[in-house]
Image (cartoon, rainbow, N blue to C red):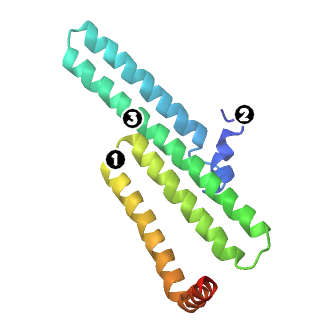
Amino acid sequence: MAAAGFDSILVWLGLGKEPAEGERKPSQVVGCLVLVAIMLFALIEASRILNFALMADLIYEFIIFAGRVLVGLVILATGIYLANLAYNTVMASNTSQAKMLAQAARISVLIFSGAMALRHMGLANEIINLAFGLLLGAIAVAVALAFGLGGREIAAREIDKWLKSMK
């Protein structure tokens, strides 16, 4: 994996720098995780051979949960990459308020990918759904209030025009 450039994945995602000499590299961490997974599969088979069905089922459930957590982390890492990509794209547009729009895009992508990752992990699905719905509802109410209070005079003029045209 090191020859394929996997050790620079943290730089690619924008999460860090190249590991220094003597530090543990991402390819080494993945290698240890694969070794642990192989040992857990071997432990499941050994438990079944020794008729420890409960222990085998427990290890099997742990492997399922660990797999969900790893896929959730991959989703989150992809979300971080996409958030940085959106930030850089909006910043490169050189529009007015580009920094604010870029931060809003980054935060939106991070919140969405974080919710997706937590949901895939199976952690508090109802809480995530409720929080996401409340957040969208709060944004809708804030926009409605801003337009309602800020555009009151314009709306009154438009209603007057409509009334005059009806007469």
Q: Is residue 108 above or below residue 70?
A: below
Q: Residue at x 64, y 53 (%)?
A: 82
Indicate the secondary structure of the residue bearing disc 2.
loop
Q: Is residue 124 visible?
A: no
Image height check: is 132 above or below 120? Answer: below
Residue 138 seen in the figure: yes
Q: In front of the other: label 2 or label 3?
A: 3
Position of 42 with respect to 84 (left or right) is left
Amino acid found under the numbered disc labelled 2: Ala
Label 2 or label 3, whichever comes before in sequence order:
2
Q: Secondary structure at mark 1?
A: helix
Q: Is residue 40 above or below residue 120?
A: above
Q: Residues within 10 Å of mark 3 (few under 14, many from 20)?
A: some
Residue matched to label 2 = 3
Look at the image and tell me in which quarter the N terminus lies: top right
Which residue matches tag 3? Answer: 66
Taking depth in this image into account, of 69 and 43 the one nearest to the observer is 69
Where residue 92 sits, quadrant-wise, is bottom right
Which callout, 1 or 2, points at the residue further toward the start of the chain?
2
Instruction: Residue 49 in the image: state x and y as whole percent.
Output: 27, 7
- Determine which residue is flagged by label 1: 125
Q: Residues within 10 Å of mark 2 (few under 14, many from 20)?
A: few
Which percent across, then down, holds residue 129?
Answer: 37, 52
Residue drawn at x 38%, y 16% as measured from the top left? 42
Please identify, in this view, whether the residue under mark 1 or under mark 2 is nearer the observer: 1
